[in-house]
Amino acid sequence: MSGVLKHMMEVKRDRGAGYVVLVDPDRYDLAELSEQAELLSQYADLLFVGGSLCVRHDFGEAVSRLKQASRVPVVIFPGDATQVSSHADAILFLSLVSGRNSDLLIGEHVKAAPRIRRYRLETIPVAYILVESGETTSVQFMSQSLAIPRRKSEIASAHALAGEYLGMKLVFLEGGSGADQHVPLKMIESVGEFVSIPLIVGGGIKNPEEAGAIVRAGASFIVTGDVIEKNGSETILREFTTAVHAE
Ligand code: 1GP
């Protein structure tokens, strides 16, 4: 194991869990991205970059600005095959295993793979699982796929295990950016007990207390985007990183 995945496993081993901040380039001015990366990377173990759509900026330019200013690895969390850049340290090779949309199970991957190879980007295979979280989120709409019902932990567990058996290195339980409710603790516990690969949990995590509870339930990585976009103060970043690493 090498590169960013190795870094993630070391963070998990040494700090108990990792804190990831998602930067959706569309939500910032291009000029703000360097400053943002400098600030976020003082507190986060990793930065994810990506979004359901990237329409405001050239994606590669946005990644490049983040990468130049970041002290921690910058990892693409792609909405589709257009979100590939040579400037990143790695790309999450996400398969939306909870959906039955073949483009997001394999189609976008086929389009992206030759470019990833050309750029020599590290790929991290991830079983991406969408969980029902209140109102329709961008990822639900854009993926045109059903989310797993909140009470159906056994369905989420079976999908995660199938991902593990397919060779994926991580499971991502996703509520969707700006979700009303984060993934239920009970589901996180059930999936964590069922699989032996680490869990990333994101979507709708609104405060450090929730982040801490999610780590206690079994998550190895916490992703926040929306809450930091709305209030990215040093105080809140410090509180999040403390809560995630304390558990
Ligand atoms: C979305 O999991 C991420 O893909 C982060 O969600 O923006 O709600 O924090 P939020």
Image (cartoon, grey):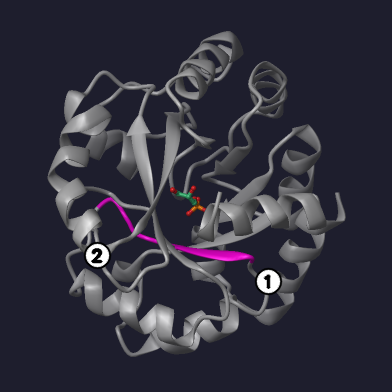
Q: Residue at x 26, y 18 (%)?
A: 100
**Residue 49 appears left or right of 6:** left
The residue tagged with tag 1: helix, strand or loop?
A: helix
Q: Amino acid at mark 2?
A: Tyr
Any part of residue 144 in sight: no
Q: Is residue 178 magenta?
A: no
Q: Which of the two residues, 80 or 205, is positioned nearer the viewer here?
A: 80
Residue 52 seen in the current view = yes
Residue 186 at x, y percent in the picture: 71, 22
Write down the residue under mark 2: 119
Q: Residue at x 55, y 20 (%)?
A: 150
Q: As drawn, is 102 to the left or to the right of 22? A: left
- Viewer-nearest of discs 2 and 1: 2
Please, which residue is most extreme toward the front here?
1
Q: Which residue is mark 1?
A: 237
Residue type at numbered disc 1: Leu
x and y, in percent, of residue 111 in the image: 13, 44
Label 2 crowd bin: few (<14), some (14–19), many (20+), radius 10 Å? some
Some atom of ligand 1 lies within 8 Å of the CB belonging to the residue at label 2: no
Q: Regarding mark 2 in the picture, which secondary structure is present there? A: helix
Above or below, 162 against 242 in this view is above
- In space, the residues marked 2 and 1 are separated at their CA atoms by 32 Å
> Which range of residues does the magenta coloring cover?
45-52
